[in-house]
């Protein structure tokens, strides 16, 4: 029987790979200290693969891991993964046709980098800074630029 990896995301944001043979629920329950763990989110990757995230929405210690975007909640289908504060350890399982598939920290990192929405963490002040239009006409007064011919001729006075 093949031994597969399950990703464990600790409360300090470090990750480890747990070994599991077939029944990932037993592996997670044996590792989990609170013994009260639920399927929280699902992400569909490719046609046949799914990521399942197990964890707690109540617990002893907040897990500061920022979840990948667009996870479908198993608790409340109106909420997405960005809307929850999770507690204690988080477990990520990859399955195909409801069977455990090997999953490594490297693979999770690749998935995370593609699916992490960094825009959700920008404050409204940051948005104003990046979206402010540049008025090049103001620069003409100081540098004598000819914007219309900037690529064709160097009309600047040196």
Image (cartoon, grey):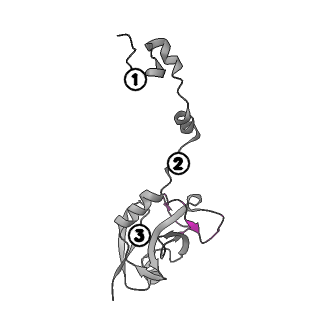
Is 54 rendered above or below residue 100? above
Q: Nearer the viewer, residue 152 or 44?
A: 152
Q: Nearer the viewer, residue 73 or 17?
A: 73
Give the structural element (helix, strand or loop) at label 2: helix
Q: Going from the N terminus, do you reach mark 3 or mark 2 first?
A: 3
Is 157 rendered above or below residue 147? above
Which quarter of the picture shows residue 57?
A: bottom right
Q: Residue 76: within the magenta? A: yes
Magenta segment? 56-78
The image shows residue 114 at horizontal and vertical percentages of: 44, 58
**Disc 3 to disc 2, C-alpha distance:** 26 Å
Marks 3 & 2, CB-CB < 8 Å contact:
no
Q: Residue 29: within the magenta? A: no
Circle 1 residues within 10 Å: few <14, some 14–19, many ≥20: few
Which residue is at the far bottom?
1
Residue 65 shows in this picture = no
Q: Quadrant of the C terminus?
A: top left
Is 123 rendered above or below residue 145? below
Q: Going from the N terminus, do you reach mark 1 or mark 2 first?
A: 2
Mark drawn on residue 69: none
Give the structural element (helix, strand or loop) at label 1: loop
Pointer 1 residue? 152
Q: Residue at x 42, y 63 (%)?
A: 111
Q: Going from the N terminus, do you reach mark 3 or mark 1 first?
A: 3
Mark drawn on residue 119: 2
Pointer 3 residue? 8
Camera-side mark, 1 or 2: 1
Camera-side mark, 3 or 1: 1
Left or right: 153, with 38 as reference point? left
The image shows residue 8 at horizontal and vertical percentages of: 41, 69
Q: Nearer the viewer, residue 144 or 73?
A: 144
């Amino acid at each position: 029987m093949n031994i597969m990896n399950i990703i464990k995301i600790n409360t300090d944001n470090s990750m480890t790979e747990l070994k599991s043979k077939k029944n990932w629920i037993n592996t997670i329950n044996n590792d989990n200290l609170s013994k009260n763990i639920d399927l929280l989110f699902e992400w569909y990757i490719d046609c046949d693969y799914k990521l399942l995230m197990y964890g707690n929405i109540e617990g002893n210690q907040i897990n500061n891991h920022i979840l990948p975007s667009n996870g479908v909640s198993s608790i409340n289908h109106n909420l997405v993964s960005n809307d929850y504060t999770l507690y204690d350890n988080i477990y990520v399982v990859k399955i195909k046709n409801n069977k455990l598939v090997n999953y490594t920290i490297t693979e999770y990192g690749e998935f995370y980098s593609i699916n992490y929405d960094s825009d959700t963490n920008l404050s409204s002040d940051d948005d104003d800074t990046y979206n402010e239009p540049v008025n090049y006409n103001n620069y003409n007064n100081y540098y004598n630029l000819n914007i219309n011919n900037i690529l064709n001729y160097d009309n600047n006075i040196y």
